[in-house]
Image (cartoon, rainbow, N blue to C red):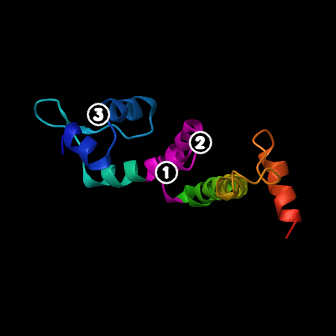
Amino acid sequence: MKIGDLAKRTGITAHTIRYYERIGLLPHAHRDGSGRRDYGEDSVVWIGFLSRLKTTGMPIRDMLRYAKLRAQGDSTGPARAALLSEHRDRVRAHLAELHSALTVLDTKIAGYGETERMDPNDADTHNITDPIGARQSRLGRD
């Protein structure tokens, strides 16, 4: 398939595909009789994997390390597994951080919802300058 077709199938630009080739992240494509790049189905699968690594925040230098190991063959399987395992640990730690941050956001959003539900005519429970204090005083009267 031509570079434009590969770009459409993978969702990355032809420019990015050429960049990946130039830095060694993507093996150089075979050339047709006219000298144009001609990619196989394996390029679609490989770019899909690279996209997942990118989505999970793997730096290009680590993707390059993985690609070089991959190019060396099956004997590098343990080294590739170790690289991916280390990255998976970083992804899990990042997910835990994101989950914690999401909990804080949810709590903050819920607080605004409580502030909106307050009776604006009740001066004790509606303190515009300190909505958290107002919420705490309102909650304390349960």
The image position of residue 2, as x and y in percent, is 18, 40
- Front tag of 3 and 1: 3
Magenta span main SS? helix
Most foreground residue, 29 or 9: 9
Residue assigned mark 1: 70
- Name which residue type carries label 1: Arg
Displayed quadrant of residue 19: top left
Whether the magenta-drawn stretch holds residue 64 is answered as: yes
Please tell me which of labels 3 and 1 falls first in the chain.
3
The image position of residue 49, as x and y in percent, is 44, 53
The image position of residue 140, as x and y in percent, is 89, 64
Residue assigned mark 2: 62
The image position of residue 85, as x and y in percent, is 65, 59
| Labelled disc at residue 48 | none
Q: How crowded is mark 2: few (under 14 residues within 10 Å), some or many (20 or more)?
A: some
- Name which residue type carries label 2: Asp
Q: How many marks?
A: 3
Most foreground residue, 81 or 104: 104
Q: What stretch is highlighted in magenta?
A: 49-74
At mark 1, the secondary structure is: helix
Most foreground residue, 49 or 92: 92
Identity of the residue drawn at 48% across and 54% down: 73
- Front tag of 2 and 3: 3
Please tell me which of labels 2 and 1 falls first in the chain.
2
Whole-angstrom CA distance, mark 2 to mark 3, is 22 Å
At mark 3, the secondary structure is: helix
Whether the magenta-drawn stretch holds residue 18 is answered as: no
Horizontal arrangement in the rendering, residue 55 relative to residue 110 (left or right): left
- Name which residue type carries label 3: Ala
Q: Where 18 falls versus 54 (above or below)? A: above
Whole-angstrom CA distance, mark 3 to mark 1, is 23 Å
Residue assigned mark 3: 14
